[in-house]
Structure formats: structure tokens, C-alpha cells
Amino acid sequence: MNTKRFLLRTSLSAMLVAPLLAQAQPPSAERTLVPGAPSSIDRFLQPPETTADLWRVVDRELRHGKVDRAKAYLKALVARPDLEAQVVPIQEQYGPDLLLRLSRMPELGPDAKELLRVAGKAARAHNNDPDRIRHYLAQIQKTPGERAFAIGQLRNIGIAAIPYFVEALEQQSNDESVMIAALMGMPKTTWPAVATMLESGDNSLASIAIEVLARWRVPESARWLWLYLADPKHPATLRARAKTALGEIGGVDPSSLPSTASALFRYTDDLGGITPSSEMIETWSWKQGKPVMEKLPASEVRFRRAVQAAQAALVSNPENQQIQRTLLRLSLLWSDQRTTAGQPIPATVIRDMLSAGPTLTSQLLLQEMAWANRASDASQKKQANAVVLGAVKNLGMIGDEVSVAVGPSTPGPLLQAIDYPDPQVQFAAAMAILQIHPKSAFPKRQRVVETLTRALGTTQEPIALIIDESNERSGRYGLIVKDLGYAARHEPNGREGFRTAAQAGPVDLILLSPTITQWRINDTIANLRADRRTQSIPILIPITDDPRGRLESLSRRYPDVTTIPEGVQSGEELGKVMNVVMQDPMPQAMPAAVRQQQRQVAIEALLRLARGELPSINVAPAAPAIAELLDDPNLGPVAAQALGYLASDVNQRRLAEVVLIQQLPAANRIASAAALCQNIQLSGRSLLPGNLETDLVNLGSQTKEPGLAIMLGRLAGLLNPTPAEVGRRLDQLDITQPAAPGTPRAPQAPAAAPPKNQQPPAKQAAPKNGAPPKKSNLFDFGN
């Protein structure tokens, strides 16, 4: 007995000591399981050779708490080329334990994240495998056991199986009742894909969708049933069943449900939540004969649903003006968002905007302008501005003269919008008035020219106006705003600062010193906020202290005036202060592309007005701003054309100066020369000083540019239209020289006979009315 006990103890000791001895000995190179694995590896275990072996070893080491050893095997596992193909079968064999551990152990590093990513991707591909889903759908038609197993697998697959359910329902060979029962057994979370069957146009599929949704009673699915109920194209029996299903979902009698228009209008009511967002969400729709999932921005989905509900509500109650205005408002907001994002506007949205009519658009414009003046929330004001801008542009396309002026002294919606405190709205209103092209005079018509002129002063960079009598502080704040991308302009007092802000083109930001004079700070802010051109410009006041509470009372009176610490030293610091004080980023200036586009459109519009498209509008006040663009490579030629129609000595002198500047592009100089000819013809005389006339005449014989030489030849005739001078100029252009007055005519040589294949010149035919033929006039230089 003692011998047996001794042998048993000895064998047990050997079993316990052997692993320790094995760990104490360094393993040979050929026994190393994976590159980089620890050397203390159990020599009694087989080295992992397959992906499944590595999976098993990682799982084992983590269960034993050997994290360092597990990390080495994990690195080898994620490096396997067949991991994605093998991960689903391995997980089905060993279970999800390893993945659950990896998700709870961040110390395993990026390899663990990579394994989880690959496993998730493989699982989604496996679940969405069409052949696998069709296999389970086919098993539904078999024995009860196979059917129960198949339904269980389809429930695990979830919403991705619904498009294949639709495919199976459309096959005549399948038992429809069995398939419908299986569909009703799917999780309720699959309702978005089922609801799209209501859009299929197939009455059978729509009927199945109504029954399934009524059975599930998911409140969110009611919107789809209301949309189906509102469409008169659907059969009356199915619409009645949809109404019954809505009663079942809401738990009420169908007769007590609200009207279709009222119910759908509720889905358009939450306009405050519709703001641009980068969040992407999944949405289902019916496309290409089946339910299709898309990932779209959340705001895009909300707009789509709200517009769809408003359109359906209007079908149910087409005379309801509140629904009409709401649909137009949604369409304008959605159009603005998609335009900002560089995306095309849906055709249905364009149709809704154009079909709204000028009266409804004018009502909405006035409503939104009033709401924007009352709104205190920045996001609400921004949304109202977008609607106002869209309504103004829409009136430019569909408006009439009543949109401009109700009567000779009563401004219409567009003339009210041209005073709206937003530069983009003012500019759009001016352009809309030109598009409508009112035939009669209207009040405040010079505001159109003022608005277009201000747009000409727009620079590529946003402008920050610094009003401070201290040059040292002005220079320091100029460097700060430059860090933020602004170009600084300086004015020493309130009066000059207001004049610059109101007249020198759009100003995007004002830094106002509290110690300014010649208009103290109270008067300066009052004027800036009272003038339509400066109402919307953000104002910052740098302060050190406010012992008498003067600035605090100003902030209460003008909530949009912000005080900032005077000691700000950099643009980055100012930006941080703005984020804290205003709880909003620095005021957003107009994008450079929009600025340049406005300048282009404005100068072209002023050219049209200068030509006399609206005779009641005087364009002369815009001439100085137009002249500033003459040396612009892009806008100079158009600006020259506009000045050509504004006859004055100042304009002629400025055009002549541009012609003489040889460093400017040839196109600018040629256009200025042609405009100078036009201007002289309109005024009936040259208003140029003698020295400029001489320089222009001399330049004609020196220039190498053919187009400029021709223009200068025309100009020489206008400046000194004597036959001798015109003949000399024409001779320089290789044209036959005419005889000077009083010179005896030289005998003409007999004309050479024309070649045989050349016809002699045809004689000028006399007019039918017997009048003598019109002679060419060398001094008629035309346009």
C-alpha cells in the first residue's frame, strides 16, 4: 500500500515539475510558434499553423491572463491573409467570447481594433449574402422544423432580409400566406424597409405592408400610412384599410382621427430642427423595384420627409394658405442648403417654388422679414435670413410689378427687402427688380444703384473696420484681424467710420473704441444700427473696465454689440474670446467666391442700366465706383463699356488715362478706347484736356497692337475730324490716301483689266424710291 502511495506521489510530482523545467530551458529556434512570440511557451503544445489555431491560442492566453503573449499571437492573427474569409466560420465554431474580450481590453492596442473591424465587416457581408438569404427564404416553404430554423436565421439577419422577402412575394410559386406569416415574424425594427412597399405602386405589396404595419403598431410608421392615404391615385379600399391601420397604431377609432392634411402638417411643424448637419443616418426608399437603404445627411433626410409631407397635405387641402406657405418655406430652405453644399436642387422643389406665385411668395417674404426682426435666437435668425433670400430670388423669377411697388409711393416687398439688414438680401432684391423690369417709375429706385455700387467695392478678403483715434491700437488690432483672414481699414472717429461702413462696400466686422470722439460711441452705434446698410454688421468693443456702467447699458440696448477684453494680443486669442463670450465662432464673412460673383453681376447690371434699360434710374452716381474697376483684368472691359454711356469730362479723362497706361492688359485699353469714342459721341464734343488729346494721337502711331490702333484711329477722327487728319490716319492703316482740300486732282492711270476669273465690281443699285444712293461718311465712326 505504501509502495503504491509512493509511486502515485512520485508521478504527480513529475507532472507538476516537468512544465517548470521546460520553462527554465530556452526553446530551440524551430520550436518558436510565431515571430515575436515570447520564448516561454509550453513545449508540450503544438505550434499554431492555421488561422483557427491562432484564434484558439489568443483566446486561451487571454483566459489565462497572459496579455503579453496574447498580443504576439494577435499580431500574427490579424496578419493572416485569409482572416476575413475564415472569421465567420471560426466564430461559429468557437463562439463570440474572444471578440467580447477584445472589445473590453483596450490595452491590446490597434491589433484588437483591426480584428474587431474585420470580424464586423465579415459578419455584415455574411448576413447580407443574397444566396444565404434566398436559401433561408426557400426553406420557409418546407417542413415546420426547417421553417422555424429559417425564420430564426432571418430574424438574426434583420432588415437586410426585407428586399429578398419582396422578391419572394413577387414569385408566383411561393405560398403567399406562408411568406406573409414569416414577414410578420420579423423584428419590428425592420419596419422602415417594409414601409417602402407602400411606394411600390403594386397594390398587392401595399396591402401586405399595411397589414404588417398594423400588426406591429410602430408609431413611427404612421407617417408612411398618412402619405399613402393622402394620394388619390391609390385604390379607395386600400386607403380605407390604411386609415383603419392608423387607428390600430394610435389605439383610437378611425372615425376620430384628424383630417389627412392636419395629420401630415404635423410632420412639417418642427422647422427649428432642420439645420445643416454632417451626421449621416440610414434611410430606406423604394428604388429599382425593391427597398433600398441609403446613408444621407440627417438634415437632408428631415427636409425630404418634411417637404414630402407638405406636398401630400397640400394635395388633401389645396386651398390652405398655411400649408402653401409652409411648403414654399421648406422648399426655399432646402434649396438654400443644397445650393450651399454644391448639390442640384430636386425638380419637385423647383416646381413648388415656381408654382407658388408672386402673391404667396410676397406674403412669405414679408412674414419672414418681420419674424427675423423679432427673433433673438441666432439659429432662428439665420434660418429666417435663408428664407428671405430665397423668396427674393424666387420673386425675381416669377414676380410682377406689384412685387416692386404697390403704387407710385408705396414700396412693394422687393423694395422693402432692399432695406433688409443683410447685404446678400439687399443685392438679391436689386437684381430681382432688374429681372422684373418695371415699366413705370417706382419709389426708392435709386436704392438699386446704391446697392449695386456697394457690391462693386467688395474685395476678395472680408473687411474689418477699426474705428479708433489711437494709431498704436489701430495697428495692433489690424494685425489681430489679419490673423483671422480680414483686411483692416482704419478710421479715426465715429463720423468717418460710419461713412466708410455705409458707402465703401460691405464691411464684415467693426472694432469700435469706447473712447472715440466726433460722434461718441453712443451716437456711432445708434447711427450704425439705424442705417439699413450697416444694421447687420457685428460690432466688437474692446474694453478694460466700465466703472460707470455706460457700456453695460449699451449692451442692453443693442444686444448684438459685444464687448471683448482690450488686452487681446492675437487672432487666435480673439477667436477663443468670441467662442466664450458669444458662444459662437467669429462672425462669418461672405465667402470670396460669392464676393467676386457679386462684383461681376453688379457691373454687368450697371452696364444694362447705363444703356437705358430702366430710364427712370440714374446711373451717374455709380460712375466713380465703376471707374475704380477700369484696371481690373476681369471686370475692366465691362466697366469701360458702362462709362462709355455716362458722358462727362471726368469719365472721358479716366478712360483716356487707362488707354495711355501701357502696363495694363490690351483688352482693358481697347475697351477703354472704344468707350471713350462712345462717350465723345454721346456728349457731342471732346471734354479732354489738350495734353491728353495729344498723347492719344501720338500713341496711335506708336502702338503695335492692331485692335488698339484701330480704336485710336477712330478716336483721332473724333478729336480732330478734319479731312487731312482723317486721311493721314487712314494712310497709316494702308488705306488709299484722299487728296487734301484745294489740291488739283492728279491724272488717274487707266485701270488695269481684271483677271479673267475675276468679276468687275458691281455698281451700287439705286434705292427703289428713287432717292440717290447713300454716301459713306468718313466721320461717322459709329459705336
Image (cartoon, rainbow, N blue to C red):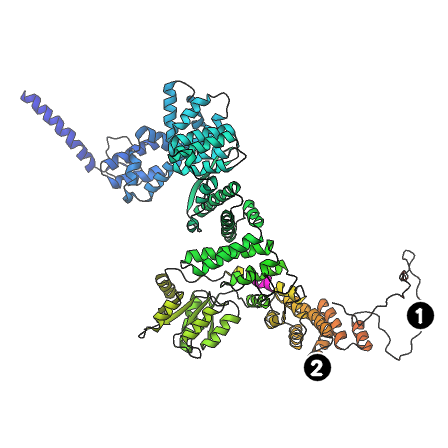
Q: Which residue is mark 1?
A: 749
From the viewer's side, name the closer residue of 644 and 319. Answer: 319
Question: x and y percent of residue 302 in the render?
Answer: 45, 45
Is residue 703 magenta-colored? no
From the viewer's side, name the closer residue of 526 and 733. Answer: 526
Q: Which mark is residue 423?
A: none
Asked whether residue 628 appears in the rendered view, the answer is: yes
Q: Tell me the magenta residue range.
A: 597-602
Specify which label sits upstream in the sequence, 2 or 1: 2
Q: Are marks 2 and 1 in contact (CB under 8 Å)?
A: no
Q: Secondary structure at mark 1?
A: loop
Disc 2 residue type (three-letter): Gly
Q: Find residue 658 and report its image quarter.
A: bottom right
Furthest residue toward top: 143
From the viewer's side, name the closer residue of 486 and 773. Answer: 773
Query: Mark 2 Cα within 10 Å, few/some/many (few <14, many 20+)?
Result: few
Q: Secondary structure at mark 2?
A: helix
Residue 747 is left or right of residue 658, and the answer is right
Q: Which residue is mark 2?
A: 690
Mark nearest the camera among 2 and 1 is 2
Question: x and y percent of residue 391 in the render?
Answer: 53, 55
Q: Find residue 97 and report its image quarter.
A: top left
Query: Mark 1 Cα within 10 Å, few/some/many (few <14, many 20+)?
Result: few
Question: x and y percent of residue 727 in the render?
Answer: 82, 74
Asked whether residue 31 appears in the rendered view, the answer is: no
Main secondary structure type of the part rendered in magenta: helix
Asked if residue 83 is positioned above or below residue 145 in the image, the reply reads below
Disc 1 residue type (three-letter): Ala
Asked if residue 42 is positioned above or below residue 458 in the image, the reply reads above
